């Protein structure tokens, strides 16, 4: 088959090479910026060593263009990679409209017109090191992006000596914001448990503060009441409504039948208290129950929406991506932007409303039927008319994927060939009232009950090489079903 049929229609992907964590998400002077971890020279002996950032930008979330690489790991402080980080944006209007600030801004009162980008510079020292307990430098670096899109050389604002002495060499992923005239930064950390084993090390978040975003001091260390994994990556402290949350990606959490099914997880804690006092964590919830979701980051755009973008991938997973065999090589993508809202204290995730502009050629039917998505790209909504009496239904994506609900359990089952090692994911949901399903050639995003739960996965169907298409079959008694074909984003047309 033509493996380029797996290239995506409306998810951001790399032109070539390797993509992972979203970084530096922001909107600045009307322009959206989506940075991401990027290895453009992969595969090859030095591919992963050149880990840096890639950059998309545009006037809206449907018209982003690839801007290339903003900076490279060519300095002593980032010699082995420009790792993940965040953006802090100046906003002149924030002081006049404090309800739109969120915890991501403003960076200042408008005097500083540069976006601040913070990331971890990775350095592996020569010698006999394990790079967990010795031999690794984690330097937090500040780069400025001016109004013309030019980037400064950058400066180191934190280094290993600035972290608690019991932390291992794994400290990274700065998320920075300004609140009440003060700058704050959270960093993910792995703390040595005593005998250098994953079952004794534990994860936590380091909270720093400072007067200017350059000078920092450690305020406190944020931990759960019980140890929860050996490393916490990608921390993201944010507010939504009147609630506070701390997003993390914990590594080393034991798997359960209906929770923590991936090798690493991504989720959020509810937070009691605030940055001016004790922070207490409770009720950890996962962002996504699918095979491929990690390293999400949130930001507030100029309309005041709290948006989230995640990596459709999973580090160190036992499964693979078939696009690694494509020519040119490319691997991984980002989720569609999701808008976060609050209901009964919990976060709902839904695709941003702009995405409906890509819909065309609607098909409507009841209960059961099959719709064909050309190029494997479509959008479907299912509304169940009798949720309490609806105990069993299924939706098939070609012959490769089965989405099934029975006995209060939603399951996602992939065939051996299309799953490339992905098999089964499931979660308990007492009642399903609605579904929103985004299918995009080799990605599925499934939103349940207006975003109460989400499942995301890569999959690789055997499309016809000449006329690729995906048949989606619904067997959903007492349901209203609407399906749309999806246009290709201009961004992705240029990458086909």
Image (cartoon, rainbow, N blue to C red):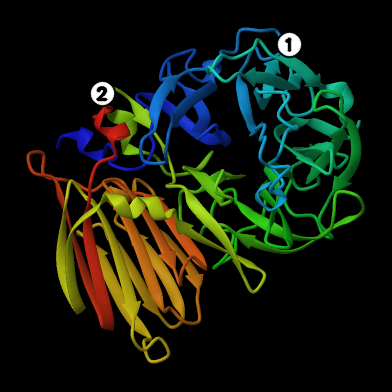
Point out which mark residue 327 bears. 2
Question: Count of labels shown?
Answer: 2
Q: Are marks 1 and 2 in contact (CB under 8 Å)?
A: no
Q: Spatial distance from mark 1 to mark 2, Cα to Cα?
A: 36 Å
Q: Residue at x 43, y 78 (%)?
A: 432
Q: Label 1: which residue?
A: 127
Where on the picture, by quarter, is residue 231? Answer: top right
**Where is residue 425 drawn, in percent x and y?**
45, 62
Q: Is residue 303 above or below residue 363?
A: above
- 452 up-or-down from 469: above or below: below
Q: Residue furthest front?
A: 96
Closer to the camera in the image, 217 or 144? 144
x and y percentages locating residue 127 in the rendered image: 73, 11
- Residue pictured at 21% horizontal, 49% vertical: 376
The quadrant holding residue 175 is top right
Residue 485 can be seen, yes or no: yes
State whether residue 263 is above or below residue 214: below
Position above or below: 218 against 418: above
Q: Picture coordinates of residue 109 (x, y %)?
A: 75, 32
Say whether disc 1 or disc 2 marks the residue closer to the N-terminus.
1
Badge 1 density bin: few <14, some 14–19, many ≥20, Cα 10 Å: few
Q: Residue at x 32, y 25 (%)?
A: 329
Q: Position of residue 138 (x, y in %)?
A: 74, 23
Q: Which label sits in the foreground, 1 or 2?
A: 2
Q: Is residue 125 left or right of residue 387?
A: right
Quadrant location, the C terminus: top left
SS assignment at label 1: loop
**Looking at the figure, which quarter contains the N terminus?**
top left
Determine if residue 251 is in view.
no
Q: Is residue 169 left or right of residue 424?
A: right
Q: Specify the label residue 260 is tagged with.
A: none
Q: Nearer the viewer, residue 172 or 261?
A: 172
């Amino acid at each position: 088959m033509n493996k380029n049929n797996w290239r995506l229609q409306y998810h951001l992907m790399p032109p070539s090479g390797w993509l992972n964590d979203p970084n530096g998400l922001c909107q600045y002077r009307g322009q959206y910026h989506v940075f991401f971890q990027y290895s453009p020279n992969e595969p090859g002996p030095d591919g992963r060593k050149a880990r840096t950032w890639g950059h998309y930008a545009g006037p809206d979330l449907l018209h982003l263009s690839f801007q290339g690489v903003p900076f490279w790991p060519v300095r002593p402080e980032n010699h082995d990679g420009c790792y993940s980080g965040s953006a802090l944006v100046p906003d002149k209007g924030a002081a006049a409209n404090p309800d739109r600030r969120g915890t991501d801004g403003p960076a200042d009162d408008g005097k500083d017109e540069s976006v601040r980008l913070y990331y971890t510079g990775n350095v592996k020292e020569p010698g006999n090191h394990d790079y967990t307990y010795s031999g690794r430098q984690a330097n937090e670096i500040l780069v400025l992006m001016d109004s013309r899109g030019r980037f400064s050389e950058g400066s180191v604002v934190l280094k290993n000596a600035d972290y608690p002495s019991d932390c291992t060499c794994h400290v990274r992923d700065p998320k920075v914001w300004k609140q009440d005239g003060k700058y704050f930064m959270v960093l993910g950390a792995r703390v040595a448990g005593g005998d250098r084993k994953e079952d004794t090390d534990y994860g936590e978040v380091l909270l720093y503060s400072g007067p200017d975003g350059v000078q920092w001091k450690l305020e406190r260390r944020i931990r759960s009441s019980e140890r929860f994994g050996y490393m916490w990556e990608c921390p993201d402290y944010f507010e939504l409504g009147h609630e506070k949350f701390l997003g993390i990606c914990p590594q080393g959490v034991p798997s359960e039948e209906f929770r923590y099914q991936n090798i690493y997880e991504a989720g959020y804690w509810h937070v009691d208290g605030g940055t001016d006092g004790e922070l207490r964590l409770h009720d950890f919830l996962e962002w996504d129950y699918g095979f491929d979701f990690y390293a999400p980051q949130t930001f507030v755009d100029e309309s005041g929406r709290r948006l989230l973008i995640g990596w459709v991938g999973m580090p160190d997973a036992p499964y693979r991506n078939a696009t690694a065999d494509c020519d040119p090589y490319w691997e991984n993508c980002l989720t569609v932007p999701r808008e976060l809202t609050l209901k009964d204290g919990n976060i709902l995730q839904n695709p941003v409303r702009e995405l409906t502009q890509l819909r065309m050629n609607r098909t409507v039917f009841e209960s059961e039927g099959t719709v064909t998505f050309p190029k494997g790209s479509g959008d479907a909504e299912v509304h169940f008319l009798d949720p309490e009496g609806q105990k069993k239904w299924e939706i098939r994506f070609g012959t490769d994927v089965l989405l099934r609900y029975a006995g209060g359990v939603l399951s996602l089952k992939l065939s051996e060939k299309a799953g490339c090692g992905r098999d089964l994911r499931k979660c308990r949901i007492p009642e399903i009232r609605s579904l929103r399903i985004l299918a995009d050639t080799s990605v599925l995003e499934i939103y349940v009950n207006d975003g109460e739960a989400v499942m995301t996965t890569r999959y690789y169907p055997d499309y016809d090489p000449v006329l690729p298409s995906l048949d989606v079959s619904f067997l959903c008694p007492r349901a209203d079903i609407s399906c749309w074909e999806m246009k290709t984003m201009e961004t992705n047309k240029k990458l086909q």
